[in-house]
Image: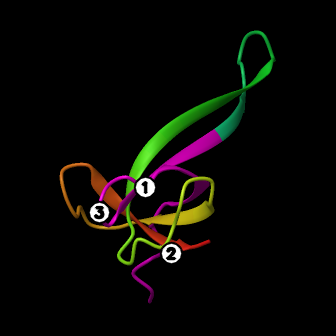
Amino acid sequence: MSTEINKKTLQGTVVSDAMDKTVVVEVGRFVKHSKYKKFYTISKKYHAHDENNQFKIGDTVEIVETKPISKKKSFVVVSE
């Protein structure tokens, strides 16, 4: 049985690569308002581990939840 069954996988855009081995990924969700029925975008930023510093601003990446690496990092970049 795979250990990655309950891991959260998100797709987003790199908005910052200023830190060493870390990128900030902005993930957007398209949701519908329960009362007014209008669609809008909710975005959230996640710090993700990038071992080789290979991802730059504007890249679309996929991140996977992992055990905490630091205070803010709980995701790892897996692919572009």
> Which residue is identified by label 1?
17
As for residue 68 lying within the magenta part, the answer is no
- Nearer mark to the viewer, of 3 and 2: 3
Relative horizontal placement of residue 78, taking residue 21 as reference (left or right): right
- Nearer mark to the viewer, of 1 and 2: 1
Q: Residue at image x 62%, y 60%?
A: 59
> Which residue is identified by label 2?
78
Pointers 1 and 2 in contact (C-beta within 8 Å): no
Relative horizontal placement of residue 63, taking residue 34 as reference (left or right): left
Q: Residue at image x 22%, y 64%?
A: 69
Q: Quadrant of the C terminus?
A: bottom right
Residue ranking furthest to the bottom? 1
The tag on residue 25 is none
The residues bearing labels 3 and 2 have C-alpha atoms spaced at a distance of: 17 Å
Q: Quadrant of the N terminus?
A: bottom left
Can you give x and y, in whole percent of width and height, for residue 45 in the image? 46, 41
- Which residue type carries mark 3? Asp
Nearer to me, 55 or 7: 55
The residues bearing labels 1 and 3 have C-alpha atoms spaced at a distance of: 8 Å
- Which residue type carries mark 1? Asp
Which picture quadrant has residue 2? bottom left
> Which residues are the magenta region?
1-28
> Which residue is identified by label 3?
20
As for residue 15 lying within the magenta part, the answer is yes
- Which residue type carries mark 2? Val
